[in-house]
Each structure stands twice: as C-alpha cells, then as structure tokens.
Amino acid sequence: MRPRFAPIRSLTSPTSRAIASPLRRSLGLLLLGLGALGAAGASAQSFPTKPLRLVVTFPSGGAPDILARLFSEKAQLGFPIVVDNKTGAGGRIAVDALKASPADGSVVMLGPDALTALYPFTFKKLNYDPKKDLVPIGTAAEFAFSFAVGTAPKVNTWAEYVAWARKNPNEANFGIPALGAPHHFFGLMLGNAINVPMQHVPFQGSAPINLALMGGQISSSIDVASSQVENHKAGKIKMLAVSTEQRIPQAPDVPTF
C-alpha cells in the first residue's frame, strides 16, 4: 500500500496575529522514493541488490547535506549508502534524477517537504506529479527558520531591524536558498506584517548567503537556523529571531518571533 503524506507538525509561534497562522511551520526534510512503479519493483525482488543511492536536493556542506552523510555513516542497513548531491531549482532538479533512476528501490531522495506540500500550488508547471511520481517514506528532520543580519545594517534586535527597514525600504531585502521555497514565503509574510515590501534575493544554498551577509551585499537572510548558528557564534552574522516556540539550545541568546 502506498504510504500517505502527513503534514509536518507546527513549530513556530509568531507574536503578531497578522502572521500567526501562515508561519506555523518549519522546514521539513522528507525521505522520498519513486512512485507506484518504483514501490512495486522494489517489492518484487530481493533487496538490496546494490548500494543505496541517496539523492540530496541541497549543496554539500549545509545542514541537510550533513544530515544525509550522518545517515549514510550511521544507518545500520547492512549495505552501503552513497550520497549524491543534485542541487538547484529548490529540489526539482533532484526529482529529475530520482525519476530517471531504476525502479528497483535502490534510489531514494532527501528533500524539502515543499516538493509535495507547497510547489504544486506555487508553480504553474512542475516536472513531476507529486501524487504519482513520489512516495514520501518519512520525515527525516525538522529545521527552525532563522532571520539574520550581517555587517549592514548595524542592528541588534528584530525591532531595530523593523525600524531600519521602514526608514530604508529600498534596501530591505532578504537572501534565500531557493525561489518558491518556504524561506521565500516566510520573508514575504514578514514584510507584509511590518508593511515593508522586502525584496527576496535567491542564492544557491546557505554558504553563499552567509558570505553575502558578511560582505554587506544583502541586509538580511532567512535560512534554517543550523546553517547560521556557527557564524552567529563567531560574531560574523547576527541571528535576530528563530521560528520555534522556544529558544533553540544551539543559540539560547536568540529570541523567538
């Protein structure tokens, strides 16, 4: 029987009614397999017949990639796991790689829940049918969102950033790792809540976002907290708020929204 997709549980607690409902969400990472043909093919033969290939929708070095490599090292499945990064287009390029794979259960994908829960409603045309081509296997992890600034503007709190953005609306932008991803809509909703048309700036992954923050090329960024916390601790960027109900243990000095 094909497994059903269950929505990721809520993890955010915004302080404003204007952004309460839409922001009750984190970035969820799902393990996904091929659709009905892949599931049937896997069950019709002995498994495994070769190493498991884990296609990852994120670049090397980021938190999701690290999670995939930890899984490949620690999972006691009795056969090797090979991590294969296929980045770009918010995970849609990785879906192409998954669809082109043999339907024998030897290839799975680690990607954002947006592939099945968000993209069908935000893109006019997708290169896959989330109901027919993908089978969500399970939730691998959940990541809190973080809002951070770099060398400019010189602010220390979310309230200070809001005041600066209202005075400098043309400079109020936010870096994101992919267009149409949850980070993108999180930023748009924050801009709506503070009445500032914040402009999104897409990057290929978390590393270039942090570099742009440190270099002052963007005024802020929205990313998973785990991709920003080390630079925050080192004083290279400043996380102003996180999207969880409670402060995260990795950065107890950062308040929640």
Image (cartoon, grey):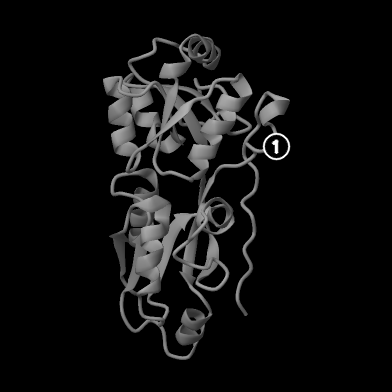
Q: Which residue is mark 1?
A: 21
Nearer to the camera, 44 or 165: 165
Residue 198, image x and y in percent?
49, 25
- Compared with residue 76, is residue 230 higher up or lower down, i.e. above or below? above
Q: Residue at x 35, y 74 (%)?
A: 100
Specify few, some or many for label 1: CA neighbours under 10 Å numbering under 14, 14-19, or 20 or more.
few
Q: In the image, is 121 to the left or to the right of 235?
A: right
Can the viewer see residue 188? yes
Q: Residue at x 29, y 35 (%)?
A: 208
Q: Quadrant of the C terminus?
A: top right
The single residue placed furthest to the front in the displayed view is 124
Query: Which amino acid type is marked by label 1?
Result: Ser
- Compared with residue 204, is residue 147 higher up or lower down, i.e. above or below? above
Looking at the rendered structure, the number of numbered marks drawn on it comes to 1
Nearer to the camera, 252 or 215: 215
Residue 183, image x and y in percent?
49, 39
Can the viewer see residue 75? no
- Compared with residue 245, is residue 69 higher up or lower down, i.e. above or below? below
Residue 201, image x and y in percent?
39, 33
Q: In the image, is 53 to the left or to the right of 245?
A: left
Q: Quadrant of the N terminus?
A: bottom right
Quarter residue 104 falls in: bottom left
Q: Residue at x 26, y 22 (%)?
A: 215
Quarter residue 170 falls in: top left
Nearer to the camera, 189 or 75: 189
Residue 164, image x and y in percent?
48, 10
- Compared with residue 231, is residue 27 higher up or lower down, i.e. above or below? below
Helix, strand or loop status at disc 1: loop
